[in-house]
Amino acid sequence: MTESSPGGRLVDAYDLVIFDLDGVVYLVDRPIETAVAAVGRLHAEGKPLAYATNNASRRADEVAALLTGMGLDVRPQEVLTSAAAAAELLAHRFPPDSPVLVVGAEALRNEVRDVGLRPVSRLEDAPVAVVQGYGPQVGWADLAEAALAVRAGADWFVTNTDRTLPTARGPVPGNGSLVAAVRTALARDPDVVVGKPEPALFTAAARRFGAARPLAVGDRLDTDIEGAVRAGMESLLVLTGVSAPADLLRAAPSARPDFVASDLGGLFDPARVARLTAEPADAAGTGWQVVADGGPAVLTGEGPSMAALAALCAAAWSGAPVDDIEPGSEAARKALGELDLLR
Protein backbone atom coordinates (compact mmCIF):
# COMPACT_ATOMS: atom_id res chain seq x y z
CA MET A 1 0.00 0.00 0.00
CA THR A 2 1.31 3.49 -0.84
CA GLU A 3 0.75 6.86 0.74
CA SER A 4 -0.78 8.11 -2.50
CA SER A 5 -3.14 5.17 -2.86
CA PRO A 6 -5.01 4.36 0.34
CA GLY A 7 -7.10 1.76 -1.48
CA GLY A 8 -4.00 -0.18 -2.47
CA ARG A 9 -3.76 0.44 -6.22
CA LEU A 10 -1.29 3.13 -7.19
CA VAL A 11 -3.16 4.06 -10.36
CA ASP A 12 -6.36 4.97 -8.49
CA ALA A 13 -4.72 8.08 -6.99
CA TYR A 14 -4.31 9.79 -10.38
CA ASP A 15 -6.59 11.21 -13.09
CA LEU A 16 -4.17 10.68 -15.98
CA VAL A 17 -1.26 8.31 -16.65
CA ILE A 18 1.43 9.62 -19.01
CA PHE A 19 3.58 6.84 -20.43
CA ASP A 20 6.96 6.98 -22.05
CA LEU A 21 7.05 4.36 -24.80
CA ASP A 22 10.43 2.80 -25.62
CA GLY A 23 11.52 0.85 -22.56
CA VAL A 24 8.10 1.14 -20.91
CA VAL A 25 5.50 -0.20 -23.37
CA TYR A 26 7.86 -1.74 -25.92
CA LEU A 27 11.53 -2.29 -26.69
CA VAL A 28 12.21 -0.94 -30.19
CA ASP A 29 9.11 -2.45 -31.90
CA ARG A 30 8.65 -5.49 -29.67
CA PRO A 31 5.93 -5.14 -27.03
CA ILE A 32 6.71 -5.75 -23.37
CA GLU A 33 4.12 -8.37 -22.47
CA THR A 34 3.33 -7.12 -18.97
CA ALA A 35 3.07 -3.55 -20.23
CA VAL A 36 0.60 -4.38 -22.97
CA ALA A 37 -1.56 -6.22 -20.46
CA ALA A 38 -1.42 -3.30 -18.02
CA VAL A 39 -2.25 -0.65 -20.63
CA GLY A 40 -5.09 -2.79 -21.97
CA ARG A 41 -6.47 -3.08 -18.46
CA LEU A 42 -6.33 0.70 -17.99
CA HIS A 43 -8.18 1.20 -21.29
CA ALA A 44 -10.84 -1.26 -20.20
CA GLU A 45 -11.28 0.64 -16.92
CA GLY A 46 -11.63 3.96 -18.76
CA LYS A 47 -8.52 5.58 -17.26
CA PRO A 48 -7.32 8.58 -19.33
CA LEU A 49 -3.92 7.82 -20.87
CA ALA A 50 -1.31 9.76 -22.80
CA TYR A 51 1.95 8.74 -24.44
CA ALA A 52 4.86 11.21 -24.42
CA THR A 53 7.88 10.12 -26.42
CA ASN A 54 11.23 11.74 -27.16
CA ASN A 55 11.58 9.58 -30.27
CA ALA A 56 11.24 11.93 -33.25
CA SER A 57 11.32 9.22 -35.92
CA ARG A 58 7.53 8.64 -35.93
CA ARG A 59 4.48 10.90 -36.08
CA ALA A 60 1.58 10.63 -33.66
CA ASP A 61 -0.60 8.65 -36.07
CA GLU A 62 2.28 6.27 -36.79
CA VAL A 63 2.87 5.73 -33.07
CA ALA A 64 -0.84 5.11 -32.54
CA ALA A 65 -0.86 2.61 -35.40
CA LEU A 66 2.19 0.83 -33.98
CA LEU A 67 0.56 0.51 -30.55
CA THR A 68 -2.74 -0.56 -32.07
CA GLY A 69 -0.85 -3.29 -33.93
CA MET A 70 0.36 -4.51 -30.54
CA GLY A 71 -3.23 -4.97 -29.40
CA LEU A 72 -3.79 -1.57 -27.77
CA ASP A 73 -6.56 0.86 -28.63
CA VAL A 74 -4.62 4.12 -29.01
CA ARG A 75 -5.76 7.31 -30.72
CA PRO A 76 -3.32 9.78 -32.33
CA GLN A 77 -4.54 12.57 -30.04
CA GLU A 78 -3.26 10.55 -27.05
CA VAL A 79 0.30 10.69 -28.43
CA LEU A 80 2.70 13.59 -27.93
CA THR A 81 6.03 13.44 -29.80
CA SER A 82 9.09 15.63 -29.54
CA ALA A 83 9.01 16.02 -33.34
CA ALA A 84 5.57 17.63 -33.31
CA ALA A 85 6.46 19.80 -30.31
CA ALA A 86 9.64 21.00 -32.02
CA ALA A 87 7.74 21.87 -35.21
CA GLU A 88 5.17 23.86 -33.24
CA LEU A 89 7.92 25.85 -31.52
CA LEU A 90 9.56 26.58 -34.86
CA ALA A 91 6.24 27.75 -36.32
CA HIS A 92 5.84 30.21 -33.44
CA ARG A 93 9.37 31.52 -33.94
CA PHE A 94 9.56 31.93 -37.75
CA PRO A 95 7.20 33.16 -40.51
CA PRO A 96 5.47 30.70 -42.89
CA ASP A 97 7.62 29.12 -45.61
CA SER A 98 10.83 29.82 -43.71
CA PRO A 99 13.53 27.28 -44.65
CA VAL A 100 14.44 24.88 -41.83
CA LEU A 101 17.31 22.42 -42.17
CA VAL A 102 16.02 19.07 -40.91
CA VAL A 103 18.38 16.41 -39.59
CA GLY A 104 16.45 13.27 -38.74
CA ALA A 105 13.74 10.94 -40.02
CA GLU A 106 11.08 11.70 -42.59
CA ALA A 107 8.56 12.06 -39.76
CA LEU A 108 10.37 15.18 -38.54
CA ARG A 109 10.44 16.65 -42.06
CA ASN A 110 6.69 16.06 -42.37
CA GLU A 111 5.99 17.73 -39.02
CA VAL A 112 7.97 20.80 -40.12
CA ARG A 113 6.13 20.88 -43.45
CA ASP A 114 2.72 20.53 -41.78
CA VAL A 115 3.21 23.67 -39.67
CA GLY A 116 3.85 25.74 -42.80
CA LEU A 117 7.65 25.76 -42.81
CA ARG A 118 9.89 24.52 -45.64
CA PRO A 119 12.21 21.58 -44.90
CA VAL A 120 15.65 21.87 -46.50
CA SER A 121 18.84 19.85 -46.25
CA ARG A 122 21.73 22.13 -47.28
CA LEU A 123 23.48 25.26 -46.06
CA GLU A 124 22.99 26.77 -49.52
CA ASP A 125 19.21 26.82 -48.87
CA ALA A 126 19.85 29.58 -46.26
CA PRO A 127 18.01 27.90 -43.35
CA VAL A 128 16.85 30.15 -40.51
CA ALA A 129 17.00 27.19 -38.14
CA VAL A 130 18.28 23.65 -37.78
CA VAL A 131 16.09 21.02 -36.13
CA GLN A 132 17.85 17.80 -35.18
CA GLY A 133 16.12 14.55 -34.23
CA TYR A 134 16.93 10.86 -34.22
CA GLY A 135 16.89 8.99 -37.52
CA PRO A 136 18.56 5.65 -38.18
CA GLN A 137 19.94 6.94 -41.50
CA VAL A 138 21.48 10.15 -40.14
CA GLY A 139 25.14 10.29 -41.17
CA TRP A 140 28.21 12.48 -41.22
CA ALA A 141 27.03 14.58 -44.16
CA ASP A 142 23.81 15.49 -42.29
CA LEU A 143 25.71 16.47 -39.15
CA ALA A 144 28.16 18.51 -41.21
CA GLU A 145 25.37 20.54 -42.85
CA ALA A 146 23.83 21.15 -39.44
CA ALA A 147 27.12 22.41 -38.01
CA LEU A 148 27.73 24.67 -41.00
CA ALA A 149 24.23 26.13 -40.83
CA VAL A 150 24.41 26.86 -37.10
CA ARG A 151 27.84 28.41 -37.53
CA ALA A 152 26.35 30.62 -40.25
CA GLY A 153 23.71 31.91 -37.82
CA ALA A 154 20.80 29.45 -37.88
CA ASP A 155 19.07 28.74 -34.57
CA TRP A 156 19.66 25.17 -33.36
CA PHE A 157 16.68 23.16 -32.11
CA VAL A 158 16.98 19.53 -30.98
CA THR A 159 14.08 17.21 -30.30
CA ASN A 160 15.81 15.46 -27.40
CA THR A 161 19.19 14.61 -25.94
CA ASP A 162 18.74 10.92 -25.02
CA ARG A 163 22.26 9.53 -25.08
CA THR A 164 21.03 6.01 -25.84
CA LEU A 165 18.07 4.06 -27.16
CA PRO A 166 17.07 0.77 -25.47
CA THR A 167 17.13 -2.34 -27.63
CA ALA A 168 16.78 -6.05 -26.96
CA ARG A 169 20.58 -6.30 -27.39
CA GLY A 170 21.34 -3.41 -25.05
CA PRO A 171 21.55 0.41 -25.27
CA VAL A 172 22.66 1.93 -28.59
CA PRO A 173 23.49 5.57 -29.49
CA GLY A 174 20.48 7.87 -29.44
CA ASN A 175 19.88 11.43 -30.63
CA GLY A 176 21.89 12.84 -27.74
CA SER A 177 24.98 11.08 -29.06
CA LEU A 178 24.41 12.64 -32.50
CA VAL A 179 23.79 16.04 -30.92
CA ALA A 180 27.06 15.62 -29.00
CA ALA A 181 28.97 15.33 -32.28
CA VAL A 182 27.59 18.66 -33.51
CA ARG A 183 28.07 20.23 -30.07
CA THR A 184 31.73 19.19 -30.11
CA ALA A 185 32.23 20.62 -33.61
CA LEU A 186 30.61 23.93 -32.64
CA ALA A 187 31.86 24.16 -29.04
CA ARG A 188 28.38 25.31 -27.98
CA ASP A 189 25.05 23.92 -26.78
CA PRO A 190 21.78 23.84 -28.75
CA ASP A 191 19.54 26.91 -28.49
CA VAL A 192 16.42 24.89 -27.69
CA VAL A 193 15.94 21.34 -26.37
CA VAL A 194 12.31 20.24 -26.73
CA GLY A 195 11.91 16.74 -25.29
CA LYS A 196 12.35 15.30 -21.84
CA PRO A 197 13.88 16.22 -19.39
CA GLU A 198 12.32 19.52 -20.43
CA PRO A 199 8.77 19.52 -18.97
CA ALA A 200 6.89 20.59 -22.13
CA LEU A 201 5.61 17.16 -23.20
CA PHE A 202 4.30 16.39 -19.71
CA THR A 203 2.62 19.75 -19.21
CA ALA A 204 1.09 19.60 -22.70
CA ALA A 205 -0.39 16.19 -21.93
CA ALA A 206 -1.90 17.44 -18.67
CA ARG A 207 -3.44 20.45 -20.45
CA ARG A 208 -4.79 18.32 -23.29
CA PHE A 209 -6.65 16.03 -20.88
CA GLY A 210 -7.49 18.60 -18.20
CA ALA A 211 -5.65 16.55 -15.59
CA ALA A 212 -5.12 17.91 -12.08
CA ARG A 213 -3.13 14.94 -10.73
CA PRO A 214 -1.23 13.08 -13.44
CA LEU A 215 1.31 10.30 -12.95
CA ALA A 216 4.31 10.14 -15.27
CA VAL A 217 5.73 6.68 -15.99
CA GLY A 218 9.17 6.14 -17.49
CA ASP A 219 12.25 3.94 -17.64
CA ARG A 220 14.94 6.65 -17.67
CA LEU A 221 15.97 8.75 -14.70
CA ASP A 222 17.74 11.40 -16.78
CA THR A 223 14.81 12.10 -19.13
CA ASP A 224 11.44 10.70 -18.00
CA ILE A 225 11.86 11.13 -14.26
CA GLU A 226 13.78 14.40 -14.33
CA GLY A 227 11.18 15.76 -16.74
CA ALA A 228 8.39 14.80 -14.36
CA VAL A 229 10.21 16.45 -11.46
CA ARG A 230 10.58 19.65 -13.49
CA ALA A 231 6.88 19.50 -14.40
CA GLY A 232 5.91 19.12 -10.74
CA MET A 233 4.38 15.67 -11.30
CA GLU A 234 4.70 12.47 -9.31
CA SER A 235 6.45 9.69 -11.20
CA LEU A 236 6.91 5.94 -11.40
CA LEU A 237 10.15 4.35 -12.61
CA VAL A 238 9.75 0.92 -14.21
CA LEU A 239 12.79 -1.34 -14.54
CA THR A 240 12.01 -2.64 -18.03
CA GLY A 241 14.23 -0.23 -19.96
CA VAL A 242 17.38 1.80 -19.42
CA SER A 243 17.73 2.74 -15.73
CA ALA A 244 18.56 -0.05 -13.28
CA PRO A 245 18.40 -0.31 -9.47
CA ALA A 246 22.08 0.66 -9.18
CA ASP A 247 21.33 3.88 -11.12
CA LEU A 248 18.40 4.61 -8.81
CA LEU A 249 20.61 4.40 -5.72
CA ARG A 250 22.89 7.07 -7.24
CA ALA A 251 20.09 9.32 -8.52
CA ALA A 252 20.39 13.03 -7.83
CA PRO A 253 17.42 14.74 -6.16
CA SER A 254 16.44 16.25 -9.53
CA ALA A 255 15.92 12.75 -11.00
CA ARG A 256 14.35 10.77 -8.14
CA PRO A 257 10.98 9.11 -8.78
CA ASP A 258 8.23 8.85 -6.21
CA PHE A 259 7.70 5.14 -6.91
CA VAL A 260 9.56 2.20 -8.42
CA ALA A 261 8.18 -1.04 -9.89
CA SER A 262 9.64 -3.93 -11.81
CA ASP A 263 7.09 -3.31 -14.60
CA LEU A 264 3.70 -1.72 -15.24
CA GLY A 265 1.99 -4.38 -13.17
CA GLY A 266 2.99 -2.19 -10.23
CA LEU A 267 0.17 0.18 -11.17
CA PHE A 268 -2.27 -2.41 -9.85
CA ASP A 269 -0.38 -4.66 -7.42
CA PRO A 270 0.92 -3.06 -4.18
CA ALA A 271 3.43 -5.90 -3.76
CA ARG A 272 5.12 -4.92 -7.05
CA VAL A 273 5.56 -1.21 -6.35
CA ALA A 274 7.28 0.77 -3.59
CA ARG A 275 7.16 4.39 -2.57
CA LEU A 276 10.59 6.01 -2.38
CA THR A 277 11.84 8.45 0.23
CA ALA A 278 15.11 10.03 1.30
CA GLU A 279 14.19 9.53 4.98
CA PRO A 280 15.19 6.12 6.40
CA ALA A 281 12.60 6.48 9.17
CA ASP A 282 9.86 6.76 6.53
CA ALA A 283 11.09 3.52 4.92
CA ALA A 284 10.94 1.58 8.20
CA GLY A 285 7.70 -0.11 7.19
CA THR A 286 9.21 -1.81 4.16
CA GLY A 287 10.15 -4.97 6.11
CA TRP A 288 13.82 -4.36 5.34
CA GLN A 289 16.65 -2.70 7.23
CA VAL A 290 19.93 -1.30 5.94
CA VAL A 291 22.92 -0.92 8.24
CA ALA A 292 25.81 1.15 6.87
CA ASP A 293 28.43 1.97 9.49
CA GLY A 294 31.58 2.46 7.46
CA GLY A 295 31.95 -1.00 5.97
CA PRO A 296 29.75 -2.63 3.33
CA ALA A 297 26.05 -1.86 3.75
CA VAL A 298 24.13 -4.87 5.07
CA LEU A 299 20.55 -5.56 4.00
CA THR A 300 18.43 -7.63 6.38
CA GLY A 301 14.73 -8.41 6.69
CA GLU A 302 12.24 -9.89 4.28
CA GLY A 303 9.55 -8.89 1.83
CA PRO A 304 9.19 -7.95 -1.86
CA SER A 305 12.34 -6.93 -3.72
CA MET A 306 10.85 -3.52 -4.58
CA ALA A 307 10.46 -2.84 -0.86
CA ALA A 308 14.12 -3.81 -0.38
CA LEU A 309 15.05 -1.34 -3.11
CA ALA A 310 13.03 1.36 -1.32
CA ALA A 311 14.97 0.72 1.91
CA LEU A 312 18.27 0.89 0.02
CA CYS A 313 17.23 4.15 -1.69
CA ALA A 314 16.30 5.68 1.65
CA ALA A 315 19.75 4.83 2.97
CA ALA A 316 21.60 6.01 -0.14
CA TRP A 317 19.60 9.22 -0.59
CA SER A 318 20.17 10.17 3.05
CA GLY A 319 23.92 9.95 2.52
CA ALA A 320 24.77 6.43 3.69
CA PRO A 321 27.45 4.63 1.64
CA VAL A 322 25.75 1.79 -0.24
CA ASP A 323 28.15 1.27 -3.13
CA ASP A 324 28.93 -2.14 -1.65
CA ILE A 325 25.92 -4.10 -0.36
CA GLU A 326 26.00 -7.46 1.39
CA PRO A 327 23.03 -9.69 2.24
CA GLY A 328 22.35 -10.30 5.91
CA SER A 329 19.93 -13.17 5.28
CA GLU A 330 18.85 -15.59 2.57
CA ALA A 331 15.83 -13.39 1.85
CA ALA A 332 18.17 -10.43 1.37
CA ARG A 333 20.41 -12.47 -0.92
CA LYS A 334 17.40 -13.36 -3.07
CA ALA A 335 16.19 -9.74 -3.19
CA LEU A 336 19.62 -8.39 -4.11
CA GLY A 337 19.88 -11.03 -6.82
CA GLU A 338 16.53 -9.99 -8.28
CA LEU A 339 17.69 -6.37 -8.23
CA ASP A 340 21.06 -7.22 -9.83
CA LEU A 341 22.79 -5.71 -6.81
CA LEU A 342 24.42 -8.90 -5.53
CA ARG A 343 28.20 -8.78 -5.83
Image (tube, rainbow, N blue to C red):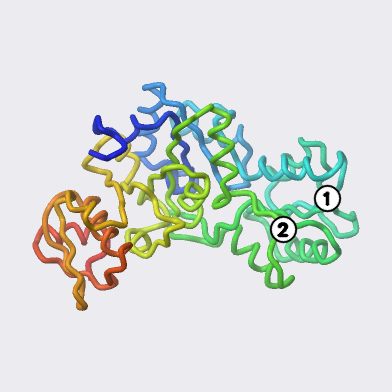
Q: Nearer the viewer, residue 69 or 187?
A: 187
Q: Amino acid at mark 1?
A: Val
Residue at point 59%, 58% (across, down): 161
Q: Quadrant of residue 35?
A: top left
Q: Quadrant of residue 265?
A: top left
Q: Residue at point 29% right, 34% down?
A: 5
Q: Secondary structure at mark 2?
A: loop
The disc label shown at residue 169, or none: none
- Res 80 → quadrant: top right
* Circle nearer the viewer, 2 or 1: 2
Q: Say few, some or many: other residues with alpha carbon within 10 Å of mark 1 (under 14 / 14 to 19 / 20 or more).
A: some
**Res 191 label:** 2
Residue type, numbered disc 2: Asp
Total numbered circles:
2
Q: Residue furthest left?
A: 329
The x and y percentages for residue 130 are 77, 55
- Which residue is at a point 53% across and 33% down the rendered structure image? 206
Q: Earlier in the sequence, mark 2 or mark 1?
A: 1
User: In the picture provided, is 317 more to the left or to the right than 49?
Assistant: left
16 up-or-down from 296: above or below: above
Q: CA distance from mark 2 to mark 1?
A: 19 Å
Q: Residues within 10 Å of mark 2 (few under 14, many from 20)?
A: some
Compared with residue 328, is residue 278 higher up or lower down, i.e. above or below? Answer: above
User: Which residue has dot 1 on it?
Assistant: 120
**Image coords of residue 256 (percent x, y):** 40, 55
Residue 268 falls left or right of residue 290: right
Q: Nearer the viewer, residue 2 or 31?
A: 2
Secondary structure under tag 1 reads: strand
Which residue is located at x 42 percent, y 45 percent? 24
Residue 34 image point, x, y percent: 33, 39
Of the pair 336 and 166, the residue shown nearer to us: 336
